[in-house]
Image (tube, rainbow, N blue to C red):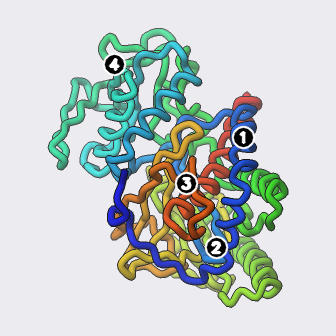
Amino acid sequence: MLSTNQVPHLQTALTGPLLQLEKHLLDHRTEIESWFRKQFMVTPAPFYASVDLRNAGYKLAPVDTNLFPAGFNNLHPDLRSLAVHAAQTAVTQICPIADGILIIPENHTRNFFYLENVFSLKTILENAGYEVQIGSLLPDLEEPMEIELPSGNALTLKPIRRQEDKVGVDDFFPCAVLLNNDLSGGRPEILENLDQTLLPPLDLGWANRYKTEHFKHYSDVANSFAELIGIDPWLVAPTSLQCGPVNFKERTGLENLACSVNQVLESTQKYYDTHNIDCKPFVIVKSDSGTYGMAIMSVNTPEDILNLNRKQRNKMASVKEGLQVEHMLVQEGVYTFETINNAVAEPVVYMIGSHVIGGFYRVHTGKTATDNLNSPGMHFEPLSFEGSCVVPDAHQSPDASPNRFYAYGVIARLALLAAAREMAEAKKDK
């Protein structure tokens, strides 16, 4: 059991309305858990995911859902048993005969932070009872490469090879292949048409996936959930619009983008006025595909888009792997009024299967409540979900750590359910 001093101290402004939401979730936890159980029976969850949340005090909502999550090394080691149990359940449900798992990571050899994540993920799966090997897509890798990690551990990357309709390393060709590579650079030919279970499927990589589609599914999920427990869906869902095509370098499409920004700003202001929320609306503009916190900016007016200088336009023009941005997601900005040691923070929740296994606060000393925190200079503070997402205590204050974390777990699972529906739709369309 984690002691309270192992949980980062949380300070939240404007807590009143959110405390009401947290209490409402606690009061309806039986209906909520029953609803989730039935929903995931109909639409099984992806193998794993992480969800970035923003807590504005009056609103708690997801702003990003990652289906190829890194950062497992940031989870509190005392919660490892939750991850191991969830992994056993998830692998058994997806591939009952699996006795081994091939992990395919990003093509990083010097990003030790990422590689520590791969080692943590490998350890979780090994502790769940599976043989695990790392198969690398590095084009020039011909022999196994052992990498010494800052933690003192070592990771061995092996060249991946294809044998008929299976991929593996050496003579290891398991039925389950876990992608920890978001496929920003496209769909590797070696992974096409495999007679193995790919987790997640190739169709959910950034070569095919749009954030707009995810948030359309999320809006449907939030509406159903809100109806279930009798709340306004706006409390748990950000307004999201797609805009494109846009070319920042050539300055084409920026007028339409500015109009979309204005539309979201006006919609948010109307809601603020109706509910007496004393905040200034802002908008997050980000690439409609891709990750790593690239091609993203916070804007306060449509003119902010029209007046971008060359440096700003170049920054917004490309994402990971140098891919050019073509479509943007224009999303209602959700303040984060959480701080740790006076630095702005946001919770990130991790799940394996439909189970919450932990999370951390992304903290940034150089950012404000309206900024994207997934940027250089951030650091992480592990948070505890010890029993809290399964057995919250309605007799405690809604703001007590187990109950606040339960609220985080509920909203994160709404995003996970939206991702499950994405996955089912992609499979149906094939």
Separation (CA) of disc 4 from disc 1: 32 Å
Distance from disc 4 to disc 3, alpha carbons, whole Å, reads 31 Å
Q: Which mark is in front, 1 or 2?
A: 2
Say which of 339 and 370 sits in front: 339
Frontmost of labels 4 and 3 is 3
Eye-nearest disc, 3 or 2: 2
Distance Cα–Cα, label 1 vs label 3 = 16 Å
User: Could you say which quadrant of the image residue 232 lies in?
Assistant: bottom right
Residue 311 appears in the rendering: no
Give the residue at mark 3.
Answer: 51
Q: Position of residue 334 (x, y in %)?
A: 62, 73
Q: Earlier in the sequence, mark 1 or mark 3?
A: 3
Say the numbered circle drawn on residue 19: 2
Q: Looking at the image, which is closer to me, 428 or 95?
A: 95
Q: Residue at x 75, y 75 (%)?
A: 264
Question: Secondary structure under badge 4?
Answer: loop
Identify the residue position indicated by label 4 in the image: 169
SS state under label 2: helix
